[in-house]
Image (tube, rainbow, N blue to C red):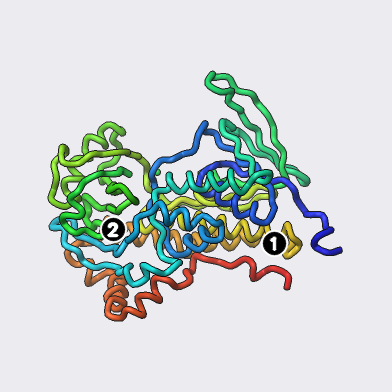
Amino acid sequence: MDSLSRKPPFSKIIIVGAGPSGLLLALLLAQRNIPTIVLESWAHLDTRLRATQYGVPATRVFRRAGVLEDIREASIAKFPSICWRRVADGEKLISLDLSLVEDHPDRMTILPLGEIIKILYRHCLEKGRGLINVRFNHEVTNVGQNGNTAWVDVNIKNGEDTTTTAARLDADYVIGCDGASSTVYYDGFEKYKWDGGNYMIDPEHWGLIARRGKGGLWRVTYGDPVMGLSDEEYLERRPEHLKAMLPGSPELEQYRIEHTNLYNIHNRCVDQFKVGRVILAGDAAHINNPMGGYGCMTAVLDVGGLADCFIGYFHGLAGEEILDLYADVRRDIFLRYVDPRSMKNLNRVATSDPHTVLETDKFFGILQDLNKDDEAMREFLLKVSSIEYDFTQHYKR
């Protein structure tokens, strides 16, 4: 039986969560005529700022999904460097020269996650007609399965009132993609010639300060060493942190805060990415701290890999076991590479001695050598990462 006449092994996938992972997965599957239903508990897209920078591996997946051009159009034109600074005096300790790859198609992607979600959703509407069905106000309350099918129980919110309708939706597979940072406007960054991304090293005021896209806004992510305070008490301490971290030590009235998210920093990973017909990807499967940009990038790579596995299975290029391979490989990558590297990134800014870290940190030693050789730095910035994995190598040839 040829590929045109064979019956696909499945016909219905439910994706829980209309965030970046869920919408990206739906887009990638729709490209190969695989239909999905995307369920979102909110009445609208989650357009909070969150991540702003996505490494080369994520850029490649965005291109596959057909959204990279629109992301580039909405982003800032140049993002020349990332550096590590000492908070005490603002001194730049070491930097990554991204201008070496500023014209390369695989260069880093820069745009707030909330804006990327809007682009993904628009592409779902424009390109996924008949294949992508996004349903808002659908809160998943339970997931179940037997040998032949999976299902989700949902509460469907009825418009503006508070009533809900309970329902059960069946599918061949259920994919969990439902898986937190201040944005500061302050013109002192250009005045003091700060880099696009600045990792701030200090035991009391560590964090990341980065341009978030067009419009002059910056994202400030910082840690507070004091434990057990209320949200209001943490916010009262914010001016102290920002005065220490921002160039020129500004007072509260010298900048404007556009948006704030409070969240706990932690790393965790589920025991299994796949149980029967229920599969997890992105934050639903694993979480890590924001230092280094591994969170969203790893989620994008999960989704890209899972899409390839479903595409191979759907079109007869692989058996169902490729879904188990996805679960094993992506979990191993998180535990072996993402988790330890993100913890090293956190410890580098939060627990290192800012006066000796340049000499004692192994990664900084590598950067110092790379900064002496432009070609070696280019290769480092564009290389295939150990957190990437090509599942199409397991297709039948």
Q: Amino acid at mark 1?
A: Gly
Precedes in sequence: disc 1 or disc 2: 2
In the displayed structure, would residue 193 be above or below residue 380? above
Q: Quadrant of the N terminus?
A: bottom right
Q: Quadrant of residue 152?
A: top right
Q: Is residue 54 visible?
A: yes
User: What residue sits right under mark 2 in the picture?
Assistant: 196
Give the camera-side residue of 138 and 112: 112
Label 1 neighbour load within 10 Å: few <14, some 14-19, many 20+: many
**Quadrant for the C terminus in the image:** bottom right
| Viewer-closest of 378 and 86 | 378
Residue pushed farthest right? 1
| Residue type at the position of mark 2 | Gly
x, y (%) of residue 149?
75, 44
Residue sitting nearer the eye, 120 or 339: 120
Residue 332, picture quadrant: bottom right
Is 91 situated above or below 268?
A: below
Residue name at image x 47 percent, y 53 percent = 70
Dot 1 falls on a residue whose secondary structure is helix
| Left or right placement of residue 60 versus residue 186 in this view | right
Q: Secondary structure at mark 2?
A: loop
Using the image, tell me which numbered label, if any, was put on residue 170: none
Place of residue 35 in the rendered image (x, y in percent of width and height, measured from the top left): 69, 47
Q: How far from the left and from the top, in percent, is residue 113?
A: 43, 48
Q: Point out which mark residue 312 bears.
A: 1
